[in-house]
Image: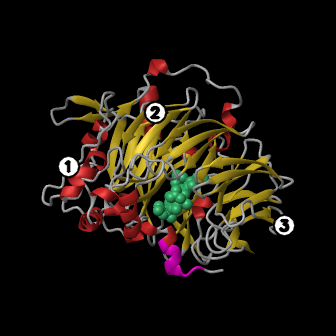
Amino acid sequence: MKLSRSTARCMVLLMILSACTLASADSGSDAGNDSGSGKPSGKPDTTTRPPAAYTEHCASCHGEARLGGIGPALLPEGLRRLSRADAAEVIQVGRPLTQMPGFGPKLSPTDLSTLVDWIYSEPSVQPSWGPAEIRASYVRHLAFEELPKEPTFQGDRLNLFMVVEQADHHVSVLDGDELVVIHRFPSRFALHGGIKYSPDGRFAFLASRDGWISQFDLYSLKIVAEIRAGINTRNIAISGDGRILLVANTLPHSVVALDASTLALLKVIPARSKQGKSSRVSAVYAAPSRESFIVALKDVAELWELDYRQDARAEYTGLVHDFGTESGEKIVRPPELLPIRRIALEGVLDDFFFDSEYHNLLGSSRNGSTWVVNLDVGRPVKKLDLGGLPHLGSGITWKLGDREVMASPNLQESSIAVLDTQSWEVIRQIPTLGPGFFLRSHENSPYAFADVFFGPHRDVIHVIDKQSLEIKATLRPAPGSLSGHVEFTRDGKRALVSISEPDGEIVVYDSMSLEIVKRIPMRKPSGKYNVFNKISYSNGTSH
Ligand code: DHE
């Protein structure tokens, strides 16, 4: 099956059309404070008045400037995934299992359509979310002294999973040995992207689409601190040494660096090309063996590498640069935090896969072309034709005989490409029952599990033999329901599949016999993240 280019783009790359302008984001420094109210304080849109119905019913939760509060931001940039008809329905009947009530009886048909028009209209003044707003949003929920020294539960703390449940905006903490939920808590609205863990697996970091970053303690099972780093956020990455958490924003156009131990603000880096063109940030990635972050920009043909070594050395060894002044007086300043190394590209690339040594990355463009970029020399070195729109972010690697291969699903084509990571030649295109989103394996498993996310076979999971590159089995864990996103237990013996429906479940498979071991009810589970597999950078999962 082949999705039309326009349908797949619509379903999967909804952000492409955006042309929002840069909100001011100057460079910040130092920490936020511990006593903020947690309420965002964006500047109100002073030139256009909101409709009376908005002020009366919506502003107290969504903010006068539509930047969010208890409820999410209501700006066109963040509403691309919701049709106007669906928005009208939510306003009328509310959102089940959230704090959003229905306002139907209080609104006339004119009020309703005015409200919908209002939330989909571009603000006449682009909202600002710079260091002051970020710092003011900081909330400390748990004091340092309240953090327990040991986990408050029994079991292997590194075999925990955190499961994002989209239907009611909750996260479940699942014990991967016993396969039971040990804790469930409400998250910020609409979490997206992988949950990241500190290198010792103690703390988890969650990002919501409307910019809230939460630090969760896996010992006390409590949220420690939160900060709103942007208005629209793509994802987060944590440095290999666990010190810095980086946030990618599409609104404003910025990269925000936080102190991973406290979530205090370290720096706001405006996303501008060498020529000064402002850009949304597609994503940020950690490259631990390079001791750097890679930043993907959505609107300019540039890739950034942000080096965190300099700063680390300065802090750990006391090394600083000396600068002479005109008067001859010596002043001492620490080196710049996260200096930018710019890599010029042939075109915009916005979905990435990194080889296991982080020497090369594969990047795909919106028009489907794929490039190998050598990070050591800092330039694109090879163009590949993988067909369709490869979803490189879901790429995984394994050993095929004595060579390393990489496999990627395709958002448009019904196939999975397998490539040699030395020559970058395509070894095989494995035909599937439809385009897929996620692909997973584990070092201890002979199989890779691939979903078929789009089309009539969206209930299918293909099990691929990693040596023969043939489909070994085709599973239908819940016939008729969307099956997506697989993740393995720490030992690789169990594969957990998300049934992403409002009354969904996690279906647990024995990864060798392919028998179902357990079904765990969940509310539209999407991604799930095994602590050990993430912190050990397992080559069968995303990082
Ligand atoms: Fe994602 C990860 C981008 C739509 C579920 N998604 C990511 C990452 C990026 C990305 C850059 C890697 C971040 C990371 O983990 O650090 N996603 C995009 C898009 O551009 C896209 C296509 C459009 C958009 O609206 O942003 C998109 N993503 C979706 C969905 O519709 C999904 C299925 C449901 C949802 O949550 O909105 C979805 N994306 C996920 C998940 C991950 C993810 C579960 C983490 C995968 C992992 O295992 O690490």
Q: CA distance from mark 3 to mark 1?
A: 59 Å
What residue sits right under mark 3 in the picture? 468
Labels 1 and 2: the sequence-earlier one: 1
Q: Amino acid at mark 3?
A: Ser
Residue 255 in the image: state x and y as whole percent: 38, 50
| SS state under label 1 | loop
Residue drawn at point x = 23 percent, y = 61 percent: 123
Query: In which quadrant of the rendered image does the N terminus lie?
Result: bottom right
Q: Is residue 526 visible?
A: yes
What residue sits right under mark 2 in the picture? 313
Label 3 close to label 2 by CB (< 8 Å): no
Question: Foreground: 95 or 516?
Answer: 95
Q: In the image, which residues are magenta? A: 3-10
In this picture, residue 444 sits left or right of residue 157: right
Labels 3 and 2: the sequence-earlier one: 2
Question: Foreground: 333 or 32?
Answer: 32
Above-or-below relation of 534 to 192:
above
Report the residue that reaches farthest toward the left: 47
Q: CA distance from mark 3 to mark 2?
A: 47 Å
Q: Is residue 36 magenta?
A: no
Q: Amino acid at mark 2?
A: Arg
In this picture, residue 73 sits left or right of residue 469: left
CA neighbours of label 3 inside 10 A, class few (<14), some (14 to 19), many (20+)? few
What residue sits right under mark 1 in the picture? 43
Question: Foreground: 405 or 475?
Answer: 475
Q: CA distance from mark 1 to mark 2?
A: 38 Å
Residue 367 in the image: state x and y as whole percent: 49, 77
Question: Foreground: 60 or 287?
Answer: 60
- Establish whether ligand 1 lies closer than 8 Å to the Cβ of label 2: no
Residue 27 in the image: state x and y as whole percent: 28, 45
